[in-house]
Amino acid sequence: MVTMLAIGVSIAATINDSIIDDSAVQEESVVGKTRYFKAKDCPEEAYENKDNNTSFYTMCRAYTTDGVFVYYDGMREIVLPPMSMPTIINGRVASSSLPTYTQPKPWPIVIEGADSETFEIISSHYLDSSLDPEQNPTLTYARDKNFLYRMGEKVVDADPDTLVILGRGYIKDKNSVYDRGRKIEGSDPKTFEFLKYGYARDKNFVYLVWQDKKIENSDGKSFEIIDEDYAKDSGAVYYKQKKLEGVDPGTFELVYQTYVGDGTYTSPSGYAKDKNFLYYQGERIEGADPDTFEIVGFHGIHARDKNFVYGYRAKKLSWIDANTFKIVSDVYFKDKNSVYYGEGKIIDNIDPITFEYLGGIYFKDRNSVWRSYYADEGGAIGSVSRIKDADPGTFQFLEYGYARDKNFVYYNGDILLDAISESFEVLNQEYSKDKNFVYFVKDKIKDADSDTFEVVDYTYTKDKNSVYYRGVKLNGVDAISLSVLSCGYAKDKSKVFTVNYNGAMNILDAADPDSFRVFEGNCYAKDKNFVYYYNGMRIEGADHKTFEIIDAWHTKDLSSVYYMGTRIEGADVKTFEAVKGDYAKDKNSVYYKGIRIEGADQGSFEVNNYGTAAKDKNTNYTSGKPVGAEEMVNHDIIFPPGMENAVLERLYPLDI
């Protein structure tokens, strides 16, 4: 595999008033002072004498002339040899076995035949109308009155007067389409278009954009994309850009999996078929019958036809009888002979005729009740075991892992000690009760009154006497006046409190329960005296009367601004505003996590959509700290002004 790398080479010269010292160019070209060809899409500062070697500025300064010759010194394409396993000698890599890099010359190269008087760097004027000039720099290309150039190399036969830059390394003129400067023979520029998933086409051929080639004998006119994996034309079917042999495109179709839940919808299963064969992910399944093939079971894991049952990745489960195959629940299934799970593993000693799914983790046959391991509400992959003494005739699944029969109550297949079956009821995922006892999961709640016990919310419960948090009694809390608030706060007639996961209660000593309330949509709270942040932490000095929320991190009152409950020193309340993420600003300063960023210009300060990177007219910032331009530039890609922080796939380089 040959890898193409674009690397930047700095011009070996000292810049002074946009002039390069002529000693830096080849000896035969020393005629006069050498100057840059200035690109229309480049700012003037790219040509100033500054220590700035970004990839974009390097391309702005790629072409020079001394009045006679034209020189190129920009991004060079370097071809590496095929990679192979290195030779190991005494546990170390032998240097002779490592790949050898072809290095560019350390001085500008002469572009043979270039006309210095009409030479210019291509501007965004040549872009296809569908492309955004700010995101598609054209500096890779240049022209004169006769020729088009890419990276200093002549594009053979290209007509610069009818040039259109298409993007992704493609250009066209009135006669042909070119891929990275190479003419695509037989291409039609009038009908050429990009499609999805790495394809392009014209009236003649289909092209693989990611592989930089056309598909021989393809038909661009009839070509259509089926989904992200499959495509076809009148003569062939393609799987992930690979031509499939022997597939009939006229009858080819995908086999879909149907899902039924909140609604019914379909999605590709990985299977496809034509009139002759069945395929899975582009591979033919020998012996399969496409006419009787159907998807069955959970998420398309199982399928069948008249001959076989198929498991994960179309594996034939030849020991299962296809005619009597039946899904029991998700990946539990059976035929006339046995019960199976997973990839067709047989479960012994179960009657397949009467085996059925009850719900949750529970199954039964005519003789026994079974529990599934590693299962959830619908059954999941795992073996089963018999539940001792369970009665299959009266056994019923309730919910949340609870079940019962005429004798016992069960939780996840285990008997719930002392629970009375006929009076047992499930309250929620963790609480249940019968006429005598209340349970938190499998444990009895000591002294809880079953008759008056009720669930307040997902953590709090109460009876006529007490309040409980996850089954733990909260001493001193009044059950009658209990009010559960948001963000972990609760109160009764005499106090406000929070409770940690282990049931330890934290009372807010100074909080007033009558006036205490939580701000809607976040975890700030206040009463008639104070303002509180997370878990009851008091925000010292905050004025409860004028306190208001700015965003999830920033708040303010009449005199101060706060970040996560901590006062931001010197912030101007009237002009303070949240920007994005942890950034904020006022008329004087910019802040990150409540700390002033020294020297930041608030007037020009802006943050990207993700709140992770920021900049002002002078500086780039990451995590609130200034960083140099070089730290934010990918040198393998040429970025236009304002796009230095973009993250682009290497398959779609911006050096078009």
Image (cartoon, grey):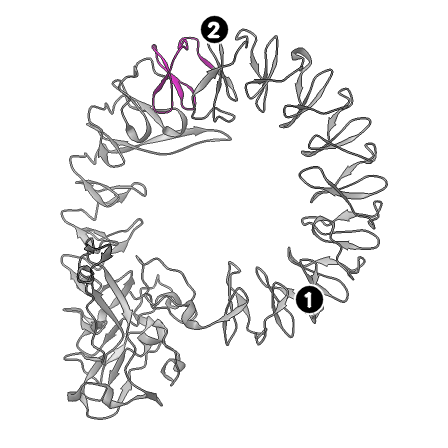
Q: Classify 10 Å Cα crowding around label 1: few (below 14), some (14-19), many (20 and above).
A: some
Asked if one can make out residue 173 in the rendered structure from this viewpoint, the answer is: no
Which percent across, then down, holds residue 51?
39, 81
Horizontal side of 445 relative to 409 (left or right) equals right
In the image, is residue 328 part of the stretch drawn in magenta?
Answer: yes
Magenta range is 327-356
Horizontal side of 50 relative to 493 (left or right) equals left
**Residue at 30% of width from left, 16% of height from top?**
320
SS class, disc 1: loop
Residue type for callout 2: Asn
Which residue is at the far front?
Answer: 90
Vertical position of residue 374 compared to residue 578: above or below: above
**Residue at 49% of width from left, 31% of height from top?**
263
In the image, is residue 309 part of the stretch drawn in magenta?
Answer: no
Which residue is at the far bottom?
Answer: 32
Q: In which image quadrant can residue 414 be found?
A: top right
SS class, disc 2: loop
**Residue at 24% of width from left, 32% of height from top?**
279
Mark 2 or mark 1: name the one nearer the start of the chain.
Answer: 2
Mark 2 sits on what residue?
Answer: 367
Q: In which image quadrant can residue 210 be found?
A: bottom left
Q: Nearer the viewer, residue 267 or 400?
A: 400
Residue type for callout 1: Ile
Mark 1 sits on what residue?
Answer: 568
Which percent across, then down, holds residue 161?
22, 73
Q: Nearer the viewer, residue 465 or 226?
A: 465
Query: How far is the residue under mark 2 from the one under mark 1?
Result: 71 Å
Q: Classify 10 Å Cα crowding around label 2: few (below 14), some (14-19), many (20 and above).
A: some
Vertical position of residue 368 compared to residue 86: above or below: above
Q: In which image quadrant can residue 492 be found?
A: top right
Which percent across, then down, holds residue 377?
52, 25
